[in-house]
Amino acid sequence: MRVSGRPVPHSHVELMKVNRIQFGVISPNDVIRMSIGKIDSERIYDERGCPTFEGINDPRMGTMKKTMHCYTCKGCK
């Protein structure tokens, strides 16, 4: 197999069979409600060097560094 003209190395990860997939639709109001973040802190990072919740780098909004995971990925808590 090739991706962008380059060979993809073989993976030794065990394959698993997908039993089912469930899709759903979110209402426009729920999308708006879930997309709003409250910014109440002027602190960017806490004493551990992690982004402050309710700050401008709130980890629930994603991450500024490639080496960190967003909060939903259970990265820097």
Image (cartoon, rainbow, N blue to C red):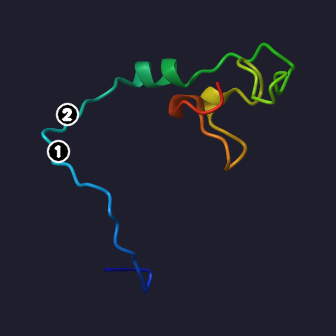
Label at residue 18? 1
Q: How far apart are marks 2 and 1 (CA)?
A: 11 Å
Can you give x and y, in whole percent of width and height, for residue 6 in the image?
44, 84
Q: In this view, does 49 lie above or below 39?
A: below
Tag 2 near tag 1, CB within 8 Å: no
Q: Looking at the picture, which amino acid does disc 1 mark? A: Val
Can you give x and y, in whole percent of width and height, for residue 27 in the image?
35, 23
Q: How many labels does the image show?
A: 2
Can you give x and y, in whole percent of width and height, for residue 71 in the image?
58, 29
Query: Residue drawn at (33%, 26%), measured in percent from left and top?
Result: 26
Query: Residue drawn at (60%, 39%), measured in percent from left and top?
Result: 69
What residue sits right under mark 2 in the picture? 22
Element at badge 1? Answer: loop
Q: Is residue 68 above or below residue 37?
A: below
Q: Quadrant of residue 2?
A: bottom left
Q: Which of 72 and 40 is in front in this view?
A: 72
Q: Quadrant of residue 43?
A: top right
Q: Which residue lies furthest to the bottom in this view?
A: 5
Element at badge 2? Answer: loop
